[in-house]
Image (cartoon, rainbow, N blue to C red):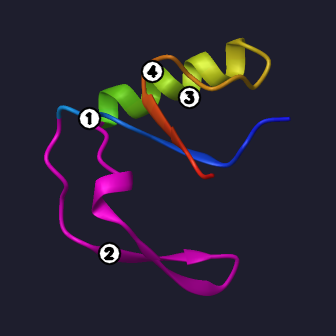
Amino acid sequence: MMRSAWGYEPDLEPGPAFTFDYAGMPTDAWPDRTRVTNATARQAARQFLTNDGQRPQALAWETVE
């Protein structure tokens, strides 16, 4: 069973806080959990799609306990 987690690039500084639409619900994002460049996001998406939905190795992962 895979635990909830978020992927990020640990070498990047956190950006500004922001809110996004999650199924019609305004949701706050935590900058320390969302720091990733566009290039790495694309690489991670490719890895996810070509590795049977496994967590992409392009990102560091922090799991929720």
* Nearest-to-viewer mark from 1 and 4: 1
Q: Is residue 25 magenta?
A: yes
Which comes before the other along the chain, label 4 or label 2? Answer: 2
Between the C-alphas of marks 3 and 1, the distance is 18 Å
Q: Amino acid at mark 2?
A: Phe
Residue at 36% in and 66% down: 30
| Camera-nearest residue between 44 and 14 | 14
10 Å neighbourhood of mark 2: few (<14), some, or many (≥20)?
few
Q: Which residue is mark 3?
A: 45
Q: Which residue is mark 1?
A: 10
Q: Is residue 36 magenta?
A: yes
Residue at 17% in and 39% down: 12
Between the C-alphas of marks 4 and 2, the distance is 23 Å
Left or right: where 30 falls relative to 17: right
Q: Position of residue 64 (x, y in %)?
A: 60, 52
Q: Amino acid at mark 1?
A: Pro
Q: Amino acid at mark 3?
A: Ala
Q: What is the total number of numbered labels drawn onto the structure image?
A: 4
> As drawn, which residue projects farthest toward the right?
1
Q: Are marks 3 and 4 in contact (CB under 8 Å)?
A: yes
Which comes before the other along the chain, label 2 or label 3? Answer: 2
Does residue 55 lie above or below 38 as drawn? above
Q: Are marks 2 and 3 in contact (CB under 8 Å)?
A: no
Q: Are marks 1 and 4 in contact (CB under 8 Å)?
A: no
Which comes before the other along the chain, label 1 or label 4? Answer: 1
Q: Which residue is mark 2?
A: 18
Q: Which stretch appears magenta?
A: 12-37
Residue 31 lies in quadrant: bottom left
Between the C-alphas of marks 2 and 1, the distance is 19 Å
Q: Secondary structure at mark 1?
A: loop
Q: Which residue is mark 4?
A: 43
